[in-house]
Image (cartoon, helix red, strand yellow):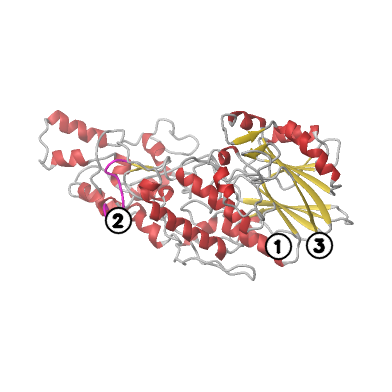
């Protein structure tokens, strides 16, 4: 369930710039280890997943030591408001560095919310939107998954992100339970503002605290959505003016505005509409600040929740307390066990992908840019025996197997996983090339992240070398040359190394980016998997 973005969901802060590394011959890390590990159960959730014996480098770190304790010294609040947003398609942490070393995921978020409620804290759960960042049929199913999960998690209000609105949320909303539908927006109506498919604002009373809530999509984002005939759209400022009188009539203790836009726009709206004492902004910092920002000249605060659903932010309100509120940034690490109910949804989601197949997901095989066809790594190994022997010892040779052995539920029918765990797919856009991997039954020779993912399709080269295709010597040499990869002096991904001109290291980052290979160092990894030429 990956999306390739520039932030890191490992435990703790990211150090150094990179989006990296290695296809068929370039990486030694264990692909997929840690997916679906057996987490310790808590009283409010059931741990799920298959355990796997991990090498020392993938042993679980202590989440408290890495990310700190939470809610230290907190008395029970009168109400705890939980803020999230910008899930960006990360239904679970994405990556092959071991989920135990990453942050985020709806299964952990579910456990976290259940734990708060289990302690007797009155919870108000709010999400600023941005559930999905990609497009296409699978992205639409992920949006439906996210909305369904947020309803199960008891969210009170969920706003819209721009990409959410491009994935037919109207159809999704029609199928939501009207009694628990959490969709709220002052300036986006699904069909219109009176249909009941979303509300313009909400007033929630919990723990004796009355809270008024609305959400808006940013001005720039609204302008880009004007072509959508099935949406009713207003500018955020105009829309807020329409709902504020009704919120003011409710005599709320706190007024909350969720803004799906850059923090600068959120601050501007907060300053124009000073009735709101808490404002959330998306698209800002990757990691939420340790403390909320204060609004100059008044008792109001700005919250940012970070990217990819790695964190939640909790504000506890105390009617008669000093201070009147407490703030906590919550890293969603493996201190929170995987929730069984959301896991069950994941199993159903993967089964649906399997039933739909590549055709049902709209994935039509496309000609490779080279115009050539794939042969499979075994064919390469008939001549390149030493290189093949080196390759066979790397995790790439068994990358498809990891989708069955370590992923729980299995991901063999998920394009976002198969695209980097099999041969003959476009790894960034998640679609198959013609003659690429289809399934273990139909194309077992293309299992694994094979030679041709780096060197290019080699069926014509192999046919020429085997005498099955008669070509002139210059033509044969041209095919050989097209498959050669040369590593430049000092090529690598670290400061002071050759990166921009490095064809190999740039090719690597197509799959092993910051999510999947957070510790990748080309110059350290390459010697461990080095292979060159023909015997």
- At label 2, counting other C-alpha atoms closer than 10 Å, the crowd grade (few under 14, some 14-19, many 20 or more) is some
Q: Where residue 452 sits in the image (x, y, percent)?
A: 29, 43
Identify the residue position indicated by label 1 in the image. Answer: 116
Q: Is residue 283 left or right of residue 533?
A: right
Q: Is residue 112 left or right of residue 344?
A: right
Identify the residue position indicated by label 2 in the image. Answer: 440
**Which element carries disc 2, helix, strand or loop?**
loop
Give the spatial CA distance, label 1 vs label 2: 44 Å
Nearer the camera: disc 3 or disc 1: 1
Q: Is residue 150 magenta?
A: no
Which comes sooner in the sequence, label 1 or label 2?
1
**Residue placed most toward the observer, 69 or 123:** 123
Identify the residue position indicated by label 3 in the image. Answer: 75
What span is in magenta? 433-443
Give the spatial CA distance, label 3 vs label 1: 13 Å
Q: Is residue 482 left or right of residue 5?
A: left
Residue 290's disc number: none
Give the spatial CA distance, label 3 vs label 2: 55 Å
Contact between labelled residues 2 and 1, with CB atoms less than 8 Å apart? no
Residue drawn 57% across the image and 43% down it: 170
Q: Where residue 131 sits in the image (x, y, percent)?
A: 58, 46
Magenta stretch, overall SS: loop
Residue drawn 12% across the image and 32% down it: 471
Name the image quarter holding residue 22.
top left
Which comes sooner in the sequence, label 3 or label 2?
3
**Residue placed most toward the observer, 366 or 502:** 366
Q: Is residue 345 left or right of residue 411?
A: right
Residue drawn 66% across the image and 50% down it: 182
Q: Where residue 520 sits in the image (x, y, percent)?
A: 46, 46
């Amino acid at each position: 369930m990956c999306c390739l973005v520039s932030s890191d969901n490992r435990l703790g802060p990211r150090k150094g710039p990179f989006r990296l590394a290695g296809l068929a011959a370039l990486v030694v890390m264990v692909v997929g280890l840690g997916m679906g590990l057996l987490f310790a159960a808590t009283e409010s959730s059931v741990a799920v997943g298959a355990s796997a014996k991990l090498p020392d480098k993938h042993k679980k770190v202590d989440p408290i030591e890495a990310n700190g304790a939470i809610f230290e010294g907190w008395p029970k609040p009168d109400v705890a408001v939980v803020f999230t947003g910008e899930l960006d398609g990360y239904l679970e942490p994405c990556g092959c560095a071991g989920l135990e070393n990453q942050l985020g995921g709806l299964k952990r978020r579910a456990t976290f919310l259940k734990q708060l409620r289990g302690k007797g804290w009155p919870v108000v759960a709010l999400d600023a939107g941005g559930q999905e960042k990609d497009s296409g049929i699978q992205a639409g199913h992920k949006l439906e998954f996210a909305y369904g999960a947020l309803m199960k998690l008891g969210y009170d209000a969920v706003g819209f992100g721009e990409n959410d609105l491009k994935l037919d949320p109207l159809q999704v909303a029609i199928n939501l339970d009207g009694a628990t539908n959490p969709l709220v927006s002052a300036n986006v109506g699904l069909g219109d503002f009176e249909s009941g498919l979303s509300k313009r604002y909400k007033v929630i009373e919990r723990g004796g605290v009355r809270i008024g809530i609305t959400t808006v999509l940013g001005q720039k984002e609204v302008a880009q959505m004007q072509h959508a005939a099935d949406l009713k759209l207003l500018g955020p400022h105009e829309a807020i003016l329409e709902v504020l009188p009704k919120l003011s009539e409710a005599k709320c203790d706190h007024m909350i505005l969720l803004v799906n836009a850059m923090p600068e726009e959120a601050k501007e709206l907060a300053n124009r509409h000073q009735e709101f004492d808490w404002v959330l902004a998306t698209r800002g910092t990757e990691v939420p600040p340790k403390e909320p920002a204060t609004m100059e000249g008044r008792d109001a605060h700005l919250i940012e929740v970070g990217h990819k659903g790695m964190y939640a932010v909790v504000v506890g309100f105390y009617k008669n307390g000093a201070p009147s509120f407490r703030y906590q940034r919550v890293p969603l690490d493996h201190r929170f066990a995987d929730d069984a109910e959301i896991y069950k949804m994941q199993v159903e989601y993967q089964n649906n992908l399997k039933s739909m197949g590549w055709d049902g997901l709209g994935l039509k095989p496309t000609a490779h840019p080279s115009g050539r066809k794939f042969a499979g790594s075994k064919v390469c190994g008939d001549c390149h025996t030493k290189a093949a022997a080196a390759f066979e010892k790397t995790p790439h040779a068994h990358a498809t197997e990891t989708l069955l052995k370590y992923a729980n539920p299995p991901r063999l029918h998920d394009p976002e996983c198969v695209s980097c765990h099999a041969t003959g797919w476009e790894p960034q856009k998640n679609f198959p090339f013609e003659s690429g991997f289809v399934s273990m039954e139909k194309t077992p020779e293309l299992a694994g992240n094979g030679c041709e993912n780096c060197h290019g399709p080699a069926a014509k080269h192999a046919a020429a070398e085997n005498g099955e295709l008669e070509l002139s010597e210059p033509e044969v040499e041209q095919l050989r040359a097209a498959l050669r990869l040369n590593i430049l002096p000092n090529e690598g991904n670290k400061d002071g190394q050759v990166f921009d001109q490095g064809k190999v290291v740039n090719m690597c980052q197509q799959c092993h980016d910051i999510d999947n290979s957070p510790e990748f160092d080309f110059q350290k990894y390459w010697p461990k998997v080095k292979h060159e030429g023909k015997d």
